[in-house]
Image: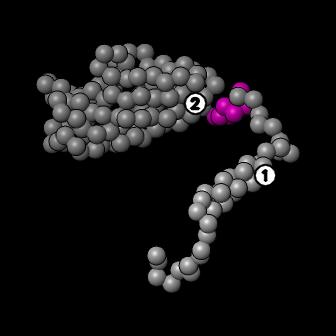
Amino acid sequence: MLLGAASLDRAPGASVRCALLGVLLLGATSCGGGTALPSTPDLLPTTPEVHVLAATIVPTTDGDAIVSFSAHNAGAEPDTLIDASCVCAESAQIVGGGEIGAQETGLFGPNGDHVLLRGFDEGLAPGDFADVTLVFANAEEVITPAEVADA
C-alpha cells in the first residue's frame, strides 16, 4: 500500500468491472456524431516530402565509403536524389538513378543506387556518426545522421 493512500474495501473483481465500464463509456462517446475522415488521396502532403531512415556509412578498402539508407517518398509525384554531401568526405557521387516513386520507399545501398563518398575521413571509427545531406529534385534537402559501420 502506498503511504498516505486511502484504503478502499472493494468486492473481488470490482476494479476490473470499473475499468471495463470506463472503456465502454469511452468507446460510446467516441463513436458517432463526428465528421468523416477524408479519403486517402486528400491525406497526401501538398508539398513534396522525403523521409530518410537507417542511414549507415560503410568504408571501402580504397579510402571511399558507401552510404546506405532507405528513403520514403511521401509525395504525390516521383522524386529523384540529385546530389549529396558530407563533411566526412572530399566529395559525394550519386551512383545509379536515384528515383523514388510516389508513395514508395527506395533502398539505397551497395547492390543498387547509392551515395559514394570519395576521400572518406578515415579518422571516423565504427559507431561514430556523420551528417549526410541528401538533395532531391522536388523535396527539400534532408540532413540525416549516418552511423559508420565496420568495413
Q: Which residue is mark 1?
A: 29
Question: How many residues crowd around disc 1 within 10 Å: few (fewer than 14), some, or many (20 or more)?
Answer: few
Q: Nearer the viewer, residue 33 or 54?
A: 33
Amino acid type assigned to the residue bearing label 2 in the image: Ala
In the displayed structure, would residue 83 be above or below residue 15? Answer: above
> Colour scheme of this structure image?
one colour
Residue 3 % position (x, y): 46, 82
Decide if residue 94 is in sight here. Answer: no
Q: Which residue is mark 2?
A: 74
Q: Which mark is residue 96?
A: none
Q: Nearer the viewer, residue 54 or 59?
A: 54
Q: Secondary structure at mark 1?
A: helix
CA distance for labels 2 and 1: 33 Å
Secondary structure at numbered mark 2: loop
Q: Which three-letter amino acid code belongs to the residue tagged 1?
A: Thr
In the rendering, at what x and y percent does residue 51 appear? 49, 35
Instruction: Check if residue 91 falls in the magenta segment.
Output: no
Side (left or right) of 121 relative to 97: left
In the rendering, at what x and y percent does residue 92 appear?
A: 31, 29
On screen, residue 109 above or below 37: above
**Numbered-mark total:** 2
User: Magenta stretch?
Assistant: 41-47
* Residue at image coords 44%, 20%: 98
Q: Residue furthest front?
A: 11
Mark 2 neighbour class, 10 Å CA radius: few under 14, some 14 to 19, many 20 or more: many
* 77 horizontally vs 105: left or right: right
